[in-house]
Image (cartoon, helix red, strand yellow):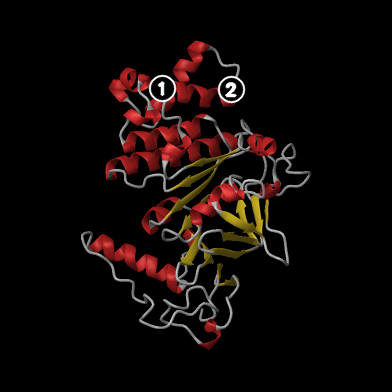
């Protein structure tokens, strides 16, 4: 058994520039994700959190960046690096940097690292029967499995994620395009778990699902994480499960995650970055103004679920400021220095926060 404190990812100087609107994800530096933890990546749509997830899984890299409309990775001063140090049999162009991997190297890497996509259509063969999709996924992990064992394993996975139920025979012969949106989402999640990866990046895994279904899916995700942790602690497997959950939902992240990485992006200034990192069991009394806004919105919506929330600092009718802190145009606490320089992540009160005021 290895120590749970070892890092599965070390991120240095991650800078991305998009090709169409020049939006930049800038200076994500000295950020680590530990083996066996549940990390929440929190932020509104368009802030860069899903792009961050695609970088971790190796979809966005130096060779394939243009497929995702990325014009450049890194900056003139320093190479962007996402290091994957725990697996000695995995290397990328003779280095540990995921961003420099070849297609062959990344295929091997994805045996260990998988992504649950926000849109399950992007990860499913829409013309393949459901049972065949799950069979292929199981065989990626256990290629020598017998036919009878394979059928049982596929049935178990389908049951675990609520696919089919009493109608399994009908669903098994159906294709993803014949399923409802919720069924496709559950199938996408089941397919990832069937490959038995060590690291799962779940991008909005329960978006648009009914409340009861959301609870079952999140409960299953947590139960799988707990089972893998127990097996690892008993020495039965080499690695626990590391879960990285990407969501705009403060409540979901607060309930599921042990540690939270908060992204903020402003489409007006075309910039996004990490503004705060904190542990859930040591929730800071005073948060970054943006994190505070997300928490306020969640509490307000819980008390008045049919109400729309007005962002308290939404640009305030001022001229857009392109320099300084990425949040300066919406912040009610901005000081002179905030309009000049982007603050770095500094350790304050047991969390890292990018704010001059705190």
Label 1 element class: loop
Looking at this view, is 183 or 65 the one in front?
Answer: 65
**Count of numbered labels shown in the rendering:** 2
Percent of width and height locating residue 19: 56, 58
Q: Residue at x 50, y 17 (%)?
A: 150
Q: Is residue 29 left or right of residue 313?
A: right
Percent of width and height locating residue 141: 58, 26
Foreground disc of the pair 1, 2: 1
Looking at this view, is 142 or 109 the one in front?
Answer: 109
Task: Give the mark, 1 or 2, whose residue is nearer the N terminus.
Answer: 1
Label 2 element class: loop
Which picture quadrant has residue 305? Answer: bottom left
Q: Residue at x 40, y 30 (%)?
A: 160
Which picture quadrant has residue 310? Answer: bottom left
Q: Is residue 217 left or right of residue 75?
A: left
Disc 1 residue crowd, few under 14, some 14–19, many 20+, Cα 10 Å: some
Percent of width and height locating residue 258: 50, 54
Tell me the quadrant of the picture where the N terminus can be found. Answer: top right
Q: Is residue 249 left or right of residue 77?
A: left
Q: Which mark is residue 321?
A: none
Residue 286 in sight in this render: no
Answer yes or no: do the residues labelled 1 and 2 have beta carbons within 8 Å? no
Looking at this view, is 302 or 2 the one in front?
Answer: 302
Q: Residue at x 53, y 53 (%)?
A: 51
Q: Is residue 85 above or below residue 190?
A: below
Disc 2 residue crowd, few under 14, some 14–19, many 20+, Cα 10 Å: some
Mark 1 lies on residue: 129
Mark 2 lies on residue: 142
């Amino acid at each position: 058994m290895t120590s749970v404190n070892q890092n599965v990812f070390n991120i240095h100087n991650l800078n991305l520039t998009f090709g169409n609107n020049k939006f930049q994800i800038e200076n994500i530096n000295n950020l680590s994700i530990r083996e066996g933890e549940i990390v929440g990546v929190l932020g509104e749509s368009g802030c860069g959190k899903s792009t961050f997830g695609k970088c971790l899984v190796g979809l966005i890299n130096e060779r394939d960046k243009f497929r995702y409309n990325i014009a450049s990775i890194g900056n003139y001063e320093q190479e962007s690096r996402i290091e994957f140090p725990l697996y000695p049999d995995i290397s990328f162009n003779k280095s540990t940097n995921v961003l420099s991997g070849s297609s062959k190297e990344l295929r091997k890497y994805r045996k260990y690292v998988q992504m649950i996509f926000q849109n399950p259509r992007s990860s499913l063969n829409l013309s393949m029967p459901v049972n065949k999709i799950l069979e292929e996924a199981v065989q990626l992990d256990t290629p020598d499995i017998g036919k009878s064992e394979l059928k049982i394993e596929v049935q178990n996975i389908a049951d675990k994620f609520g696919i089919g139920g009493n109608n399994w025979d009908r669903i098994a012969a159906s294709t993803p395009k014949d399923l409802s949106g919720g069924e496709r989402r559950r199938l996408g999640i089941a397919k990832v778990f069937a490959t038995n990866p060590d690291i799962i990046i779940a991008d909005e895994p329960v978006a648009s699902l009914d409340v009861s279904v959301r609870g079952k899916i999140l409960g299953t995700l947590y139960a799988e994480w707990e089972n893998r942790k127990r097996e690892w602690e008993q020495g039965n497997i080499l690695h626990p499960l590391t879960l990285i959950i990407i969501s705009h939902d403060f409540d979901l992240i607060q309930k599921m995650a042990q540690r939270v990485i908060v992204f903020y992006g402003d489409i007006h200034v075309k910039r996004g970055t990490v503004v705060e990192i904190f542990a859930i069991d040591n929730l800071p009394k005073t948060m970054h103004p943006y994190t505070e806004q997300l928490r306020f919105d969640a509490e307000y919506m819980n008390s008045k679920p049919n109400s729309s929330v007005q962002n308290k600092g939404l640009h305030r009718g001022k001229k857009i400021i392109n320099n300084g802190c990425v949040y300066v145009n919406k912040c009610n606490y901005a000081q002179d220095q905030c309009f000049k320089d982007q603050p770095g992540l500094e350790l304050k009160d047991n969390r890292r926060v990018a704010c001059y005021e705190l």
